[in-house]
Image (cartoon, rainbow, N blue to C red):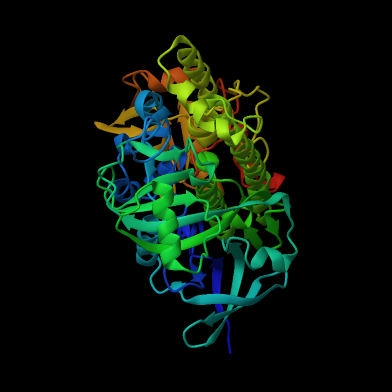
Amino acid sequence: MEAVEVPVLIVGGGGCGLSASVFLSDHGVDHLLVERHPDTSILPRAHYLNQRTMEIFRQHGLDGEVAEQGAPLEKFGKVRWQTTLTGDGPLDARVIHEMDAFGGGALSETYAAAGPVSTTKLPQLRLEPVLRRHAEERNPGRVLFGHELTTFADDGDRVLAEIRDTATGEITKVAARYMIAADGGRTVGAALGVEMRGTPRMVDVTTAYFSADLSAWWHDGTIITWFVNPYRPDLSSTLLEMGPTWGRNCEEWGLHFALGDTDRSDGRAVAARMREVLGLPELDLTLHKLTQWTVEGVLADRYRDGRVLLAGDAAHRQPPTTGLGLNGGIQDVHNLAWKLAAVLTGRADDSLLDTYEAERRPVGGQNVDWGLSTWFHHRVMTDAAIGLGAHIPPEHRASAFTTFFDPSPVGAAVRARGAEIFGTHRAECQAHDLEIGFVYEEGAVVGDGSQPPPRAPMGDVHHPTTRPGHLLPHAWIEHDGRRLSTHDLTGAATGFALLTGPAGTPWCEAAERIAEKFSIPITVARIGSGAEFTDGDGGWAAVRQITDEGAVLVRPDNHVAWRSTAGSEDPAGVLGDAVSRVLARDAEDRV
C-alpha cells in the first residue's frame, strides 16, 4: 500500500487541532487532520476565549461567527461569590462579593483600547463545530473524524504513520513532512518519551453538564458563580452558563461539585445530589454527562522532537484558573502555522521550527505557573475573605457568615477587609497582561538591546510596546478611506509588514527589494501626517516608540520581529539582515 503524502499531519481534532487546520489552510499548506472521536466535543470544557485568541480568530475570519454564538460581554463580564442559589433563610442567596472580569464592566474601555476585538464566552461544545466547519470548507476531504493514529515513526526525512478508520478498521498509511501532536498528550508525546514535568494529578473535579430552567434564581452577567455554603461546605459548588441562550434564560449549565458518597454510575442518585447542592429538591433537570477530570500543572520537557511538534494540552496542562489552557493551545498553533508555511515553501530553513519551542515553551511554562498560583490562591482566598479556615470549628461556620453580613461596624470592617482580599482575585480574572503581554525573548526575533516595559505583579496592567518579541500594539489607522487595525497589516494573506513613520520612505523602498529577494510578501505602511496611512486619533504615535524615520518589522502572527527606532544609511542591508535572521537563512543570503 502506497502512503498518502502530505506536508503536515495533524493528530487531534479538538479546539487546538482544528484551529491549526484553519490556520494552515489560510497559509496555503496542504495537510491531513485525524481525530479518533466521531464528532466534536460532547462536553462544554473550556469556555472563555481571551482577547488574544479573538484577535487571532479575527485574522482568520472566525471572530464574527464565534462572537455571534458566544455570550455578549454584558452577559459574562463579572465573577460572583454567593452563599446559595436559593432559599429563604437569613444567609441564603446572599451575594458575598462580585467584581468585573475578563474585559467586562469598568475593564471594557481598557480592553477596547488594547485590541480590535474583545473577549467572548463560548464553550468548546459550541466552538468546535464552528472550527470544524471552517476547517472542512478550507481543506475539503482532509479533516477526518473517526480516524485514529495507531503507529508512527520519524525516519529523519518524514513521519510515517498509520491511520485506522474506527468504523471500518481500514488502515491508511500517511507520509508527512511534519506532524502536529494536538492529541491532548494521549498518544504521541508518550510514544516519544516526552516527560510532562511539574505538579501532576493535584485533585479530581466532578462536573455535571445538564439542562434546567434556573431563571427564577439566576443572576445575569457572570462568567462564573462560586457558591460558598454557610452551613455545609460539602454543598459548595461552582455554576457556569453553557448556552445556547445567555443570561437568566440559559438552558444548559456546568456544575462543579462534590459527589460525596453518591454512586457516580447511578444517574438518579447523581441528579438527587445535584438538587441537594443547588438547594432545589424539586428541580426538573436533565443530566447530559457527568465527568471527572484532573487538575494538574505540567509542561512538556520539549515541544519539538524531530519532525513532530507538540501543541495545546500535549505540551502544557494547567488549572482552569485564568483560562490559559485552550487559549494557549490556539496561540501555539498560530505561532507554528506561519513557520511551517515558510519552511515548506523553502522560504525559511528547517531550524525556524526550533524557534517554536524557544518562543512558546517559556510562555507555556509561565501559564502553567500562573495557573497553579491562582488555583492555590483561590482555594484559600475565599475562606480568608469571609473569615473561615481550618482554625474555625465547623459549628462556628455559619456565625462567620452572620458576622460578614451584619450591618454593625464590625460587619462593615469584615466586609471591607474581605473586599481587599477578594481584590487579589484580579490576578485570575483581570490578568490582561497574561493574555496579550507575553513576549518572545528568543526565537525568530532580532533584539535591539532595549529593556522590556514594566510588568504588573498581578498581571492586570498591560503596557503596549514595539520592542522585538512583543505583540504589535493595536491602533486604529486609515487607508484609502478605510479604517483598519495595525494588526490587519499582517497575516496569512498579507505576510510580514513593515510599519514606518511618515519619513520612512527609505525603509519602504528597501522592503520591496527584500520581499523580492526572500520571496516573501511584505506589506509596507508609512503611517502619519502626509503618509499613505493616517493616524487620525494619534493612537499609533502613542505606542510606536520609533521616530518618523524609524521602522518596525512585524511577523505574520502579529509579533514584532525587529525594529529600528531611527533611519539607517543602509536600510536594505540592515533590513535584509533582520529578515534573514528571522527566517533562519544562511548569512550569504543576507543583503
Seen in the image, is 174 located left or right of residue 481? right
Which residue is at a point 71% across and 44% down the rendered structure image?
A: 587
Quadrant of the rendered image containing residue 97: top left
Q: Nearer the viewer, residue 502 or 172?
A: 172
Q: Is residue 410 visible?
A: yes
Q: Nearer the viewer, residue 101 or 309?
A: 101
Give x and y (percent) for residue 433: 53, 30
Which residue is at a point 56% across and 57% down the rendered structure image?
A: 293
Q: Nearer the viewer, residue 274 or 163?
A: 274
Q: Residue furthest top?
A: 409
Quadrant of the rendered image containing residue 220: top left
Seen in the image, is 411 located left or right of residue 136? right
Seen in the image, is 54 located left or right of residue 341? left
Q: Is residue 371 above or below residue 462?
A: below
Give x and y (percent) for residue 460: 52, 26
Quadrant showing the N terminus: bottom right
Q: Is residue 463 visible?
A: no
Q: Nearer the viewer, residue 284 or 112?
A: 284
